[in-house]
Amino acid sequence: MLLEIKNLAVEVSGKLVLKDINLSIDEGETHVLLGPNGAGKSTLFLTILGFPQYKVVKGSIIFKGQDITDLTTDERVKLGIGVSFQNPPTIRGVSVRDLLKLESHQEMDEELNPRMKELAEKLKFSDEFLDRDVNFGFSGGEVKRSEILQLLAQMPDFTMFDEPDSGVDIENVELLSAEIRTLLDKDKKHAQRKRSGLLITHLGYILNFVEADKAHVLMDGEIACSGNPKEILEDIRKDGFKGCVQCAQCGSGC
Ligand SMILES: Nc1ncnc2c1ncn2[C@@H]1O[C@H](COP(=O)(O)OP(=O)(O)OP(=O)(O)O)[C@@H](O)[C@H]1O
């Protein structure tokens, strides 16, 4: 198992946001996290990434067989965990180009390597754009494309995507999806996939381009049900999230 979350409870600013999360993601698998606003989806991501304000009060996070619950964010990133944020911070004084060099382990005085140059062009970033401060004055679509470009520099073994399709036009969703597929080894045969991921989506539009193996519905800090992504989305479209509460209360037989 690549990632195992066991009985995880998390407090943020003294509030218990995640209550008892159990989740396992195998090598080569892509899972989806669904759930109403405020259920705790982003909190789960930031806890996996090890942000200090997300306090684990119970349970553990195991990655590649190692207990990472007490590791720093930096240590987790080095182990191969990456994230594309919903609203990433602006970094004044640091250009996209410099951040890409840092993430792809290049020296600052070197030219950006040809692979990254090619990827930047593919994601529609001009040479001048790469000299802009990270996320400063970027449009919504530019922020999302820049997040994916940075992940391509890192090529993490496990990547979390927080609503990669929100606020993105159809052409950009297609462009981003192609690179998300690369990050998740989607263009390889199932048995040959090594990279894994967890995607937050509200409307499920991205799943038309990036297929997922399993979906989980997070409700009020707990996973209410798990199963086939298309079926679960269809159920939510028909009955809303209340159907997931019933599913959690009496199992799939009700
Ligand atoms: N730093 C914080 N301080 C106080 N409360 C917080 C903090 N971060 C998250 N919360 C609370 O935790 C709950 C879960 O928030 P979270 O952002 O994880 O939900 P979400 O499922 O990602 O929601 P959405 O779908 O709206 O993005 C919310 O009630 C939120 O207000």
Image: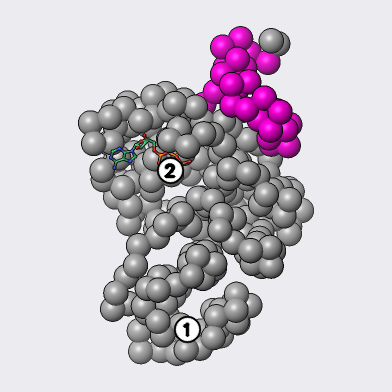
For the N terminus, the image quarter is top right
Residue 178 visible in the current orientation: no
Looking at the image, residue 96 lies above or below residue 41: below
Residue bounds of the magenta highlight = 223-252
Where residue 234 sits, quadrant-wise, is top right
Q: Does the residue labelled 2 lie within 8 Å of ligand 1?
A: yes
User: Which is the main secondary structure of the residues drawn in magenta?
Assistant: helix
Query: Does the magenta-highlighted stretch encompass residue 40?
Result: no
- Spot occupied by residue 149 in the image (x, y as percentages of width and height): 52, 70
The residue located at (55%, 80%) in the rendering is: 125
User: Picture coordinates of residue 6 (x, y %)?
Assistant: 44, 28
Q: Name the residue under label 1.
A: 129
Q: Which three-letter amino acid code belongs to the residue tagged 2?
A: Ser
Q: Point out which mark residue 42 bears.
A: 2
Q: Residue at x 63, y 77 (%)?
A: 122
Toward the left, the furthest residue is 14
